[in-house]
Image (cartoon, rainbow, N blue to C red):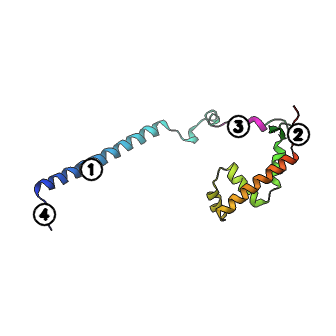
Amino acid sequence: MIEPDRTEWQIRCAFNAFCKRVLKNEAINIYNERQKRQAKEMTFSDLTPQEKNLLYTLDKQYEGEEGESLQVAGKRITPRLLAEAMRTLPIEKRNTVLLYYFFDKSDVEIAELLEIPRSTVQYRRTSSFNGLKRFLEEHADEWDD
């Protein structure tokens, strides 16, 4: 093995020491940042009920009277009509729609969860959407100005 000359060895040692010092300082910075963040953070179990209520909002659109509805493209759509439209779908398609639109899952995640190909998930979702659209168009009341 060829021995490096003394100058090259000193440069290597200096660079090695520099790298170790940089890594050590970065680890200290990360530790300090984590400590600062933990001092500001609070677990959900430590929150008061009033503070927990500030973390979310409720959609008031479907609260209240049974007669409340949503006006979309000149059609009156009620929560009951939307639920009935969902009930008309086969269970496989209904599960796909619920996972995609209400649980914010991607086609890939749904495919893994249901153990089916991703293309099947996409087909179920798009055909369900078209079926729901047709059902709502047929059964929604016309909106008169």
**Disc 2 packing (10 Å; few <14; some 14–19; many ≥20):** some
Name the residue type under label 2.
Glu
Q: How far apart are the two marked residues, 3 and 1, measured between alpha carbons?
A: 52 Å
Q: Look at the numbered discs 3 and 2 and tell me whether their residues touch, using CB distance below 8 Å.
A: no
Q: Earlier in the sequence, mark 4 or mark 1?
A: 4
**Disc 4 packing (10 Å; few <14; some 14–19; many ≥20):** few
Q: Earlier in the sequence, mark 3 or mark 2?
A: 3
Report x, y in % for residue 123: 71, 59
Q: Which residues are magenta?
A: 56-62
User: Looking at the picture, does residue 53 appear above or below residue 108?
Assistant: above
Q: Earlier in the sequence, mark 3 or mark 1?
A: 1
Label ID, residue 20: 1
- Asked whether, in this view, residue 141 is left or right of residue 102, the answer is right
Q: How far apart are the two marked residues, 4 and 1, measured between alpha carbons?
A: 24 Å
The residue lying at 69 percent from left, 54 percent from top is: 99
**Label 1 element class:** helix
User: Looking at the picture, does residue 117 appear above or below residue 53?
Assistant: below
Quadrant, the N terminus: bottom left
